[in-house]
Image (spheres, rainbow, N blue to C red):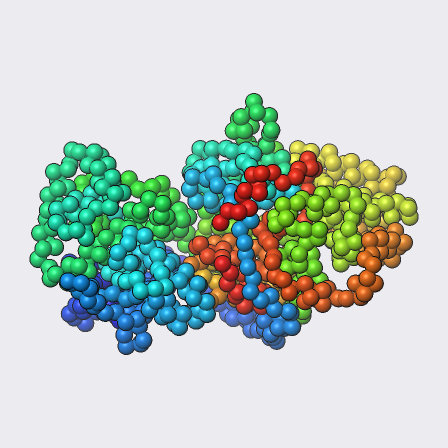
């Protein structure tokens, strides 16, 4: 009926305007607490000066772009995955290749090392996340012991073991994240809320916490409660895809790198973006970010450029 | 400037059915209605192309704008001829430094090379697309050929191009070795339709001949630069290869399959693997209701002031700076630099260093994170006959790491050991928490003991942990490896950091991951291989 249709439209519109006014109110509330800029307070921290980054090892062996890598807890082993479909485990200290697996698909966009060091997980265009136990037995074919754990309806963009070999967290082009039980392959929890592909995730570095942050093509960074599947905080200040997210070592904040050629720092207690790192001469988006141990340095990788940033939004280029 | 964009647009959109190649200098005459359409199309285009292309386009446009201090584009006299429309590498680098606020010329050269590698500017005498800070001549690419147009030229186009090059009798147009090889391969691949390709090439040559000599020089070089981007010299990276995750959102069917030379192909070419586009889900009322609930929750959230937050972040950094191998050189040495894994051996041993013991005092989480710290704390608690709290906490952590099928069993075990009436290691919970927990146990999930665990955590933190830090056991460990200079202990972390920053030979990557319990490794001294590897790059 015509009148029902009208009622329908009205409700949707009124809901939208209610949401808009709430957003405005939220912004107002947050602004009240914005009494100082991070970089102002940070001025008292001793300047780092010219920072020189040197290549210590070069690991050659992939046939095409390396899309993802993860460190083992022993601080020397690495798993890396490539566009050519290969996943390689290296002892990066000696540069020896220890294991190699050829995936049935190209573009292996995600890989992760298990906390025990006994397995790796990877996936990409196959829409799955598979776990491979690492064996030094020459007679065993690594691919034979493969276990398919996660199933998404689009490409796998990121995966990470939680603090155990038994659970894996995944992010996918289907716009969702999910937590899986490795043994059974069962879905433990799914996380819905992103409006587009999820490109990255990072687990909170807390002994007691159960949260993680994800970043997506909807320009949003969302913090999730692993237990309930609910989004507890969301940040939408980037102007393009968020390619990488990383927690600040204390777990109170996280950084994000985006195609909009900026990196931003969001604090969870202030529930706000607290710093933007950008420079006119940076053309390409940031593809990967990570913090140094103390959080003093934020390392950003962008299309064949290395940039080293201080937390106070000063950028110091390095060769 | 606006005509510059329109010029290129006319060729791509095709909405005005005009097919002129414009190198950015000629401005087309258009009516008002067409003007508005073009503005709309242009805005739409800018929304859809990749951000970095947009940025480079803006930079390049500004660079060529002589009204606002662009680079000097000149015609240069050389031997018997003139070189039209060129600019030197130095001019480009200088302009970038001035207009993009770049202080370091090395960075400016790098930015210039990125722009060249993408195909927006090119050296007139080289197939390799970089920018050098010297008198080498460069030319700007025609907007028609800009990578932001999402060209995916087929091999038939490439064949036509190489073929027509062989038809022109000029030394400067001779094929390079790799191009000759490519041509030979294409001739084999397209053996059956080579006649067609040959004819197309001839047609192109005819069109080219009609053009003005200077214009031809420019267009020829731009065309060559286009192919240098899409069919790079062996050893060079193909910068047009897009991240497959970003690919599908940029697809515009009208543009992508278009031939550079206007050749129509019956057979649709195969592109690399495409991911089917997600159907765009419309926002429902339910979505918005959820959003409203979320926003209300956020408004109610208690947040900290920026000043407090800033203090906290900086305090954390200052405290941990001495542990950060990127800033404070690791002792005895950073294995990635010295090739000596002594540091890792020490970290794995049961004998913790003074620095490591000090860290346990930073927060309760620190001691829980560190295996050795936990053991020490447990030992201390055992001496006080109060270890059940920590053991309960550890058991619950372990429960959460179990595979699904083992969870129920572990829940029961933990209940029996710590909470059931008459439990051997009874922990002390308030009645409320006990109620909740005993209810949860009935369902037996991995979060059964969350509430209890939180309770016990707070208890340990405020009580046992504080006492542990004051205990002889901890104090002895803390002072065990005190250095001879008694001054050392009194300096603050920040002072130490300031002093140590004088020689900033800092190391990274390998030292960057979170500390954890490293796996047991056989002791290995540096191998010949790793010594060799160190010298690379």
**Is residue A206 or residue B492 the one in the foreground?**
B492
**Is residue B408 or residue B168 the one in the foreground?**
B168
Residue B56: x %, y % from top left: 35, 62
The vertical placement of B397 against B81, above or below, is above
Furthest-front residue in this view:
B79
Residue B483: x %, y % from top left: 81, 57
Residue A129: x %, y % from top left: 52, 38
Residue B451: x %, y % from top left: 74, 50
**One can see residue A34 in this view:** no
Residue at 29% over, 49% down: B230
Residue at 12% over, 46% down: B167
Q: Is residue B463 left or right of residue A1?
A: right
**One can see residue B165 in this view:** yes
The quarter of the picture where the N terminus of chain B appears is bottom left
**Is residue B29 or residue B317 the one in the foreground?**
B317
Residue B38 position by quadrant: bottom left
Q: Is residue A18 left or right of residue B115?
A: right
Residue at 73% over, 49% down: B369
The vertical placement of B40 against B240, above or below, is below
**Is residue B84 or residue B265 the one in the foreground?**
B84
Residue at 63% over, 52% down: A204
């Amino acid at each position: 009926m015509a009148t029902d249709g009208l009622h329908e439209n009205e409700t949707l519109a009124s809901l939208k305007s209610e949401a808009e006014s709430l957003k405005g109110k939220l912004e107002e509330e947050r602004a009240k607490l914005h009494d100082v800029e991070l970089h102002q307070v940070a001025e008292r921290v001793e300047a780092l000066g010219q920072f020189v980054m040197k290549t210590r090892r070069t690991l050659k062996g992939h046939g095409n772009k390396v899309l993802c890598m993860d460190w083992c807890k022993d601080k020397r082993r690495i798993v890396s995955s490539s566009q050519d479909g290969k996943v390689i485990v290296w002892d990066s200290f000696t540069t020896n290749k220890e294991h190699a697996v050829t995936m049935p698909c190209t573009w292996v966009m995600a890989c992760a090392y298990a906390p025990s060091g006994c397995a790796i997980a990877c996936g990409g265009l196959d829409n799955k996340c598979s776990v491979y136990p690492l064996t030094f037995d020459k007679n065993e074919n690594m691919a034979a012991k493969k276990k398919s754990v996660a199933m998404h309806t689009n490409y796998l963009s990121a995966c990470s073991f939680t603090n155990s070999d038994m659970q894996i967290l995944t992010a996918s082009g289907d716009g969702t994240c999910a937590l899986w039980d490795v043994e059974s392959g069962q879905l433990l929890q799914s996380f819905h809320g992103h409006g587009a592909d999820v490109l990255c995730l990072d687990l909170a570095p807390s002994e007691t916490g159960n949260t993680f942050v994800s970043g997506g093509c909807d320009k949003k960074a969302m913090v999730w409660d692993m237990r309930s599947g609910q989004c507890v905080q969301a940040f939408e200040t980037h102007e393009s895809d968020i390619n990488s997210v990383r927690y600040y070592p204390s777990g109170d904040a996280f950084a994000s790198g985006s195609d909009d050629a900026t990196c931003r720092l969001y604090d969870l207690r202030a529930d706000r973006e607290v710093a933007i790192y950008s420079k006119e001469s940076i053309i390409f988006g940031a593809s990967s970010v990570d913090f140094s141990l103390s959080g003093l340095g934020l390392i950003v990788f962008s299309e064949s450029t290395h940039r080293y940033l201080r937390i106070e939004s000063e950028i110091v280029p390095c060769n | 400037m606006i005509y510059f964009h329109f010029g290129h647009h006319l060729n791509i959109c095709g909405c005005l059915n005009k097919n002129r190649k414009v190198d950015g200098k000629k401005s087309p005459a258009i009516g008002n209605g067409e003007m508005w359409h073009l503005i709309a199309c242009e805005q739409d285009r800018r929304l859809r192309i990749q951000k970095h292309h947009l940025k480079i386009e803006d930079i390049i446009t500004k660079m060529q704008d002589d009204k606002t201090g662009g680079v000097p584009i000149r015609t240069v006299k050389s031997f018997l001829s003139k070189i039209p429309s060129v600019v030197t590498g130095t001019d480009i680098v200088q302009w970038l430094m001035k207009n993009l606020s770049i202080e370091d010329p090395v960075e400016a050269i790098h930015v210039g090379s990125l722009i060249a590698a993408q195909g927006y500017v090119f050296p007139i005498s080289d197939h390799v697309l970089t920018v050098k800070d010297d008198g080498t001549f460069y030319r700007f690419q025609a907007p028609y050929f800009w990578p932001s147009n999402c060209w995916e030229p087929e091999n038939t186009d490439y064949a036509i191009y190489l073929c027509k090059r062989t038809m022109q009798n000029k030394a400067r147009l001779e094929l390079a070795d790799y191009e000759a090889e490519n041509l030979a391969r294409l001739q084999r691949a397209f053996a059956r339709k080579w006649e067609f390709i040959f004819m197309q090439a001839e047609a192109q040559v005819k069109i080219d001949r009609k053009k003005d000599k200077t214009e031809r020089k420019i267009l020829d070089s731009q065309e060559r630069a286009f192919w240098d981007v899409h069919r790079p010299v062996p050893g060079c990276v193909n910068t047009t290869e897009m991240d497959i995750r970003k690919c599908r959102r940029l697809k515009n069917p009208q543009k992508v399959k278009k031939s550079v030379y206007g050749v129509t192909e019956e057979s649709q070419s195969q592109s690399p693997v495409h991911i089917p586009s997600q159907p765009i889900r419309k926002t429902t009322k339910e979505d918005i209701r959820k959003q409203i609930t979320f926003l209300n929750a956020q408004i109610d959230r208690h947040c900290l002031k920026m000043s407090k937050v800033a203090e906290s972040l900086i305090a954390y950094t200052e405290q941990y700076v001495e542990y950060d191998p990127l800033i404070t050189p690791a002792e005895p040495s950073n294995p990635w630099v010295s090739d000596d894994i002594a540091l890792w051996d020490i970290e794995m041993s049961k004998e913790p260093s003074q620095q490591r013991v000090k860290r346990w005092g930073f927060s309760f989480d620190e001691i829980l994170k560190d295996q050795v710290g936990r053991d020490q704390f447990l030992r201390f608690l055992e001496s006080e006959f109060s270890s059940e709290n920590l053991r309960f906490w550890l058991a619950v952590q372990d429960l959460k790491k179990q595979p699904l099928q083992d969870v129920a069993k572990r829940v029961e075990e933990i209940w029996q050991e710590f909470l059931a009436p008459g439990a051997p290691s009874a922990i002390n919970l308030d009645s409320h928490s006990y109620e909740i927990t005993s209810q949860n146990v009935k369902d037996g999930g991995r979060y059964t003991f969350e509430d209890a665990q939180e309770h016990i955590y707070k208890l340990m933190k405020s009580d046992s942990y504080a006492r542990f830090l004051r205990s002889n056991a901890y104090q002895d460990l803390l002072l065990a490896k005190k250095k001879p200079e008694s001054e050392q202990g009194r300096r603050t972390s920040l002072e130490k950091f300031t002093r140590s920053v004088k020689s900033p030979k800092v190391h990274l990557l390998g030292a960057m991951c979170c500390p954890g319990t490293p796996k047991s490794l056989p002791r290995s001294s540096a191998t010949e291989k790793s010594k060799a590897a160190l010298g690379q790059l």
